[in-house]
Amino acid sequence: MNDPKAGFIGKAVERREDYRFLTGVGQYTDDVALPNQTYGYFLRSPHAHAKIVSVDTAAAAKASGVLAVLTGKDFESVGGLPCGWLINSLDGSPMKEPKHAVLAADKVRYVGDHVALVVAETLAQAKAAAALIAVDYEILPAVVDTGTASKAGAAVHDIAPDNVCFVWGCGDRAATDAAFAKAAHVTKLQFVNNRLIPNAIEPRAANALYSRADDSYTLYVTSQNPHVERLLMTAFVLGLPEHKVRVIAPDVGGGFGSKIYLYAEETALVFASKRVGRPIKWTAERSESFLSDAHGRDHVTVAELAIDKDGRFLALREHTTANMGAYLSTFASCIPTILHSTLLAGQYTTPAIYSEITAVFTNTAPVDAYRGAGRPEATYLVERLVETAAREMKVDPAELRRRNFIKTFPYATPVGLTYDTGDYDATLTRAMALADVKGFAARKAESAKKGLLRGLGYAAYIEACGIAPSNIAGALGARAGLFEAGEVRVHPTGKVTIFTGSHSHGQGHETTFAQVVADKLGIGMDDVDIQHGDTGKILFGMGTYGSRSLAVGGTAIVKAVDKVIAKGKKIAAHLLEASDADIEFANGEFRVAGTDRKKTFAEVALTAYVPHNYPLDKLEPGLNENAFYDPTNFTYPAGTYICEVEIDPDTGRVRIDRFVAADDFGNVVNPMIVEGQVHGGLAQGIGQALLEGCVYNEDGQLVTGSYMDYALPRADDLPSFVVETVKGTPCTHNPLGVKGCGEAGAIGATPAVINAVVDALAHLGVRDISMPVSPHNVWKTIRAAQKKH
Amino acid sequence: MRVALSFQVNGKPVSAEVEPDTLLSTLIREHLRLTGTHVGCDTGQCGACTVLVDGRAVKSCNVLAAQMQGAEVTTIEGITPDDGSMHPMQAAFKACHGLQCGFCTPGMVMSAIDLVTHHPHGSEREIREGLEGNFCRCTGYQNIVKAIAQGAKAMGV
């Protein structure tokens, strides 16, 4: 697969990263062993909420092999872990932003909160010493429940006595209320978007090293965005010079959002590494991952849809209470607001929308972006309302959707976004054909003969990827830019190394980006190498999240490639004694237009580095270009998912009979990788609907703290999906015409499953069901409905 | 008290002295520096640490190194040819896009080899059930299931 003639874009090229992963020579953070390695272990709070009266570390410090014991006192002089997005309340006041200390000093605020770091020669010694630390806690009442946190009577933080972080609004409230007043039909739902624990299979890990030789630090860490990690850690927390800290995110075993954030562990390790003078490694045990990785979702929502007599949507309004957890994680505040409320138009022309979000603190782990981040919650809200409305109005749910689809683009929604392009009818039509919706009635009758209940559910989702542009995001409270950077280094022999800020931790960038670059330069893929994940190599990067990598990071690379070609044309013009304007570049050759006089890409590259016959008076030698790309808009992938379930009413067991996804991702570079991304997203979306749910008890103890209690989807929990990427509508504002595909599955799957389950149970009087839809839950729901009727 | 043991790892004799509570996964990763075997949980649920012991899939975080006296242990490195090619099961995972982040992959491949060796010609359903002990959070399993069927064919089982 190295012949450039046939082109690479659009081909299912096998992944070049796979060899190392399949043969065990990948290098993940925990695989890094440094000379004189030491080990860190964190003593964590066993209480959800407690005052730290005293911490006695004397015995631990004297224990065998112990090199250092750090507590909250050691971090009093440095900053707290920052939040990257300022949200202002409706009354104009800024969100409550309590200090998030690296190690807790005065109080612990969730089970798993960090109390002390023990560094020792071995991990076993560090653990043993941690057990000798005596912490005197004064236990305080815990605030746990999202919906009632504001009336809990106890405060997680003194600066927020009612536990409210902010109350934020989006859309035109008066216009929305007016539309409701004249509606022929109003559909109302109250539901919980269940809290999830991300569970990348590689636990978080870090290995920090201080070098006295040049007063510098090196941090290996499981990060989706090493530059952001470095910037936040140096500038906002530790006050270290940014240029003296190198952050390396080597192979990273999945992220799904949970490895975006700056965490206490790696920050404490960097801080302690200078004191210890030796590298310190920490790797989370799975129980630590459950306790302390940022969780996702956790919304309590009331939502209403106003509809006229012809089935046209007039308005949508909602109130959501969003759980922030004990502290504001890196992007926590923008998830239920900027990334949620702005998606509430969905695929529909709903003219008036109002969304109000109350964010609350609780004594639980911080909550932040998890695959989809606000958009799954928005899509669940809209698609559950639409499906419920269709049933109430006795309209076919596909027809109701079609009647309200946005059909002309660009389309400005009432919640701040402008969709550039889309064809929602196409994906709905294709999904219905793939799912054989026409045959559903017959299948339902067959199921009924066996005493089984069959239901079909739709979800027509829209996603907004590649959050941008930076100036608008800044006006909305972002404290960071949202561009991406890329560098193209052409070597003298014409080989190319690409440096990208888009970290790859499963997405296959090393393949996809190479396809793009090889195509643009007309060279073989083997002549292109992709480097990412090291602040010592990469000029800058905002990292990988929000399905932005190809649309934003890929575009930055394309812009740098364009600069290389532009400079190459000048070099070729000199060599061919032609004017710059007469040089054309195609198929890896610079050619004088309309002639057979040409120079290959490799010849031009060599000339740039051996500039003997070269316009040195006008042009610098070398062929190395970089570009920063800040998009003008989000991209808007969309699609329709259809789920068909069969339920055994005696056991409550839900079996997914079929699951169909028809997506419009614009142009597709590698269909194999895109399909794989959709598969993974669907598994997580179905996991939320049927299996996964984070549970804290009333004392704030995490009940679902292991794989024996938290139901991560296994192979036999899932069906084989039918996934098709339709011939899409290319994005209009990036040169590749791509939209992003990483989160779609997780966004669209959950409401499709729940709509199917409710459809199967609707004749029993069931209107809604809480997630996850466990057999017990279904069984109880059926029994409750039978009692009522 | 340390335990002395001799066993085979990837066809080579290994002698080691370990603490009685040293896990096989620790011995493989820390002592032998074979870092292809990964540890993803503490409870024997995720299967990332799966290796073959005397030809059967074993979760190496759930057995003690001291239990390995006389055993033949095969890790992901042990099934990989030296010439840059791959075992048919590895090749099938690549061809079917049966991996994304790669962290669960070595354990998944070792489990797959055990599965198809002892339960050849499995249906899709049987393969899914056979993967009960291995988590993957990236792929949704579909391409793993496909890869295992294809790998089994290529292995001639």
Image (tube, coloured by chain):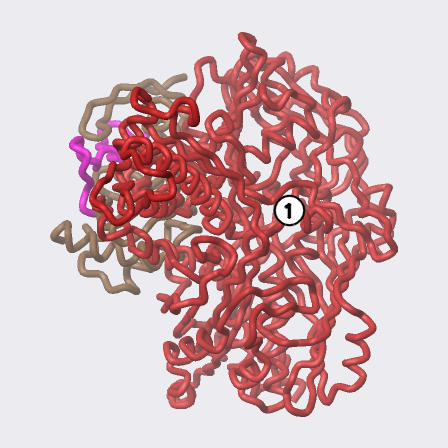
Chain colours: A red, B brown
> What chain does mark 1 sit on?
A
In the rendered structure, which amino acid carries the disc numbered 1? Ser
Q: Residue at x 44, y 76 (%)?
A: A426
In this rendered view, identify the residue nearer to me: B74 or B105: B105
In this rendered view, identify the residue nearer to me: A709 or A323: A323
Instruction: Tell me if I can see residue B127 in this picture.
Output: yes
In this rendered view, identify the residue nearer to me: A385 or A650: A385
Q: Quadrant of the N terminus of chain B?
A: top left
Residue A169 counted in the magenta span? no
Q: Looking at the image, is A513 positioned above or below residue B1? A: below
Q: Residue at x 81, y 28 (%)?
A: A53
Q: Is residue A214 left or right of residue A555?
A: right
Q: Looking at the image, is A283 positioned above or below residue B17? A: below
Q: Residue furthest left?
A: B156
The location of residue A716, given as percent across then percent down, is: 37, 61
Dot 1, crowdedness within 10 Å: few (<14), some or many (≥20)? some
Q: Is residue A294 left or right of residue B115?
A: right
Instruction: Tell me which corner region of the image, top left, top right, bottom left or bottom right, holds residue A68.
Output: top right
From the image, tell me which residue sits under label 1.
Answer: A470
Total marks shown come to 1
Instruction: Tell me if I can see residue A450 in this picture.
Output: no
Q: Which element is circle 1 on?
A: helix
The location of residue A570, given as percent across then percent down, is: 37, 35
The location of residue A181, given as percent across then percent down, is: 81, 83
The location of residue A576, given as percent across then percent down, is: 27, 34
Instruction: Tell me which corner region of the image, top left, top right, bottom left or bottom right, holds residue A389.
Output: bottom right
Residue B86 counted in the magenta span? yes
Q: Is residue A502 left or right of residue A182?
A: left
* Region in magenta: B67-88
Q: Residue at x 57, y 84 (%)?
A: A403
Q: Looking at the image, is B119 positioned above or below residue A239? A: below
